[in-house]
Image (cartoon, coloured by chain):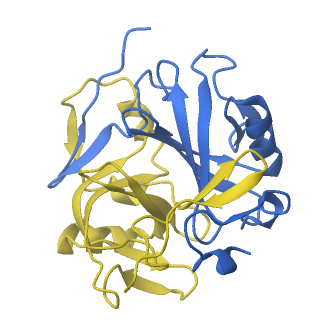
Chain colours: A blue, B yellow
Amino acid sequence: MFDQLETTDKGTQIDLKGVLSSLNFNKDGLIPAIAQDVESKQVLMLAWMDLTAIQTTLKEGNVCYWSRSRNTYWRKGETSNHFQRLVEMRIDCDGDTLLLLVEQDGLACHTNRRSCFYLTVTGQKLIVTESPQIA
Amino acid sequence: MFDQLETTDKGTQIDLKGVLSSLNFNKDGLIPAIAQDVESKQVLMLAWMDLTAIQTTLKEGNVCYWSRSRNTYWRKGETSNHFQRLVEMRIDCDGDTLLLLVEQDGLACHTNRRSCFYLTVTGQKLIVTESPQIA
């Protein structure tokens, strides 16, 4: 399915039905999903989804992941109130990664930072480039 | 290691030595790496790296991935001339994802598009939102 779309021009449409189940999930039935702030373009985090999490996210409008550590669905914000509202879901060329453009309430990272990517490699050092915010 | 950095403030530095081998690689020894255009902030692609690919990228300055389909190292641009120059490498809070800020020569996607994320979910349709460029 994704092969056929490689050479098609902007504006080509196909029914979503069948697309989602054709995604290239890994052996655990999961696909990585990158969350990007739709306004600032900041990459906030990467987490994982299964087919049900994708369908739940599209239906409910708030992002739902699969938590690999807790082995359960994880409606982002359900305990932290830091919800991610889905603005747009994109799929990559070979159907094995999702890009979620989101409106992020507050902080995306469990360490009380806006983004999970606060560790920066600089020369022979790893530097913390954002402080945790006071809750 | 990454746990200890969660509560530390901006400016904290640790030696990179030991950090890279402490990354949370998956069972195949790989970690996902998101490539983001450092200027436009566009998310270009997601690919995979092993420890050697990370070290090669840091040493050479051009991004080197591990190709899961070809089962070999993949110096982005070696056949396409669409090199990715690494500007900054970031690591996420739990050490299981990399974010690469890059200068992208030409097109990141093998379908002749700037970004791999040209398929957009809109209602009950999947829409191609970028045309391939003429080579």
Rendered location of residue B29, percent (x, y):
53, 69
Instruction: Farthest residue to the left: give it.
Output: A123
The quarter holding residue B106 reads: bottom left
Q: In the visual, does B60 lie left or right of A27?
A: left
Residue under the point 40% across and 74% down: B65
Near-viewer residue (A117 or B52): A117
Instruction: Please state the horizontal and vertical placement of residue A17, each as a whole percent of the image.
Output: 85, 58
The image quadrant that residue A44 belongs to is: top left
* Percent of width and height locating residue A86: 62, 34
Can you name the residue that lies furthest to the top here?
A: A135
Is B17 on the left-hand or right-hand side of A97? left
* Displayed quadrant of residue A85: top right
Instruction: Please report the residue visible at 51 percent of the width from the left and 67 percent of the height from the top.
Output: B30
**Foreground pick, A100 / B15:** A100
A48 left or right, relative to B43: right
| Outermost residue, front side | A11
Residue at the location (61% across, 22% down)? A83
Instruction: Tell me the quarter of the image containing the C terminus of chain A.
Output: top left
> Residue B7's spot in the image, x, y percent?
37, 23
Numbered label tally: 0
For the point 61% across and 14% down, the residue is A81
Vertical placement of residue B31 versus A99, above or below: below
| Vertical placement of residue A57 versus A95, above or below | above
Up-down relation of residue B21 to residue B92 (above or below): below
- In which quadrant of the rendered image does the N terminus of chain A lie? bottom right
